[in-house]
Image (cartoon, rainbow, N blue to C red):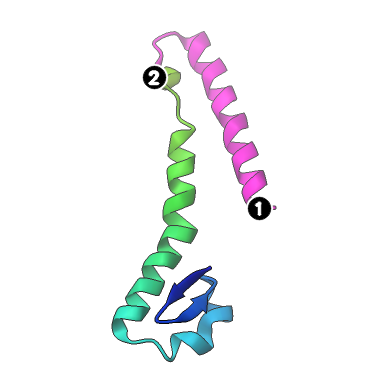
């Protein structure tokens, strides 16, 4: 939850539609930035953080093992995100 112009918002348009109508332009921009960070930027940063330093190893065996490990970590990340 975020408070913008003394109103509480969840970051979801369907829930926030009544409050969004009462915001000024600057308030709508603040809501949009919050929504962008909530839905895109935060998950993307967490996804990028999963990439390890061994990602570009020169050994094929190491690459395949590393790729499988990263894939499993990514799948776990998205499963917990969906819950």
Residue stretch in magenta: 57-83
Q: Nearer the viewer, residue 44 or 31?
A: 31
Horizontal and vertical percent position of residue 19: 49, 86
Horizontal and vertical percent position of residue 29: 33, 75
Secondary element under disc 1, as helix, strand or loop, is helix
**Which label number is shown at residue 49?**
none
Secondary element under disc 2, as helix, strand or loop, is helix
Q: Main secondary structure of the magenta part?
A: helix
Q: Which residue is mark 1?
A: 82
Which residue is located at x 45 percent, y 47 percent? 44
Q: Is residue 31 above or below residue 64?
A: below
- Asked whether, in this view, residue 79 is left or right of residue 41, the answer is right
Rate crowding at label 1 as few (under 14), some (14 to 19) or many (20 or more) other CA atoms within 10 Å.
few
Rate crowding at label 2 as few (under 14), some (14 to 19) or many (20 or more) other CA atoms within 10 Å.
few
Q: Residue furthest right?
A: 83
Q: Is residue 22 above or below residue 71?
A: below
Asked whether 73 falls inside the magenta stretch, the response is yes
Which residue is located at x 41 percent, y 20 percent? 53
* In this rendering, the label closer to the viewer, 1 or 2: 1
Which residue is located at x 44 percent, y 90 percent? 21
Q: Residue furthest left?
A: 26
Q: Residue furthest front?
A: 6
Asked whether 82 falls inside the magenta stretch, the response is yes
- Asked whether, in this view, residue 77 is left or right of residue 6, the answer is right
Please count the marks in the image: 2
Q: Is residue 73 above or below residue 7?
A: above
- Asked whether, in this view, residue 61 is left or right of residue 56, the answer is right
Estimate the spatial distance between the alpha carbons at disc 1 and disc 2, rounded to whole Å: 29 Å
Q: Which residue is mark 2?
A: 56
Horizontal and vertical percent position of residue 72: 62, 30
Which residue is located at x 48 percent, y 41 percent? 47
């Amino acid at each position: 939850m975020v408070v913008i112009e003394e109103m509480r918002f969840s970051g979801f348009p369907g829930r926030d539609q009544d409050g969004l109508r009462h915001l000024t332009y600057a308030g709508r921009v603040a809501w949009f930035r919050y929504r962008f960070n909530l839905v895109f930027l935060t998950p993307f940063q967490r996804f990028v953080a999963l990439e390890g330093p061994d990602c570009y190893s020169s050994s094929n065996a190491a690459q395949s093992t590393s790729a499988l490990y990263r894939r499993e970590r990514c799948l776990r990340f998205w499963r917990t995100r969906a819950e």
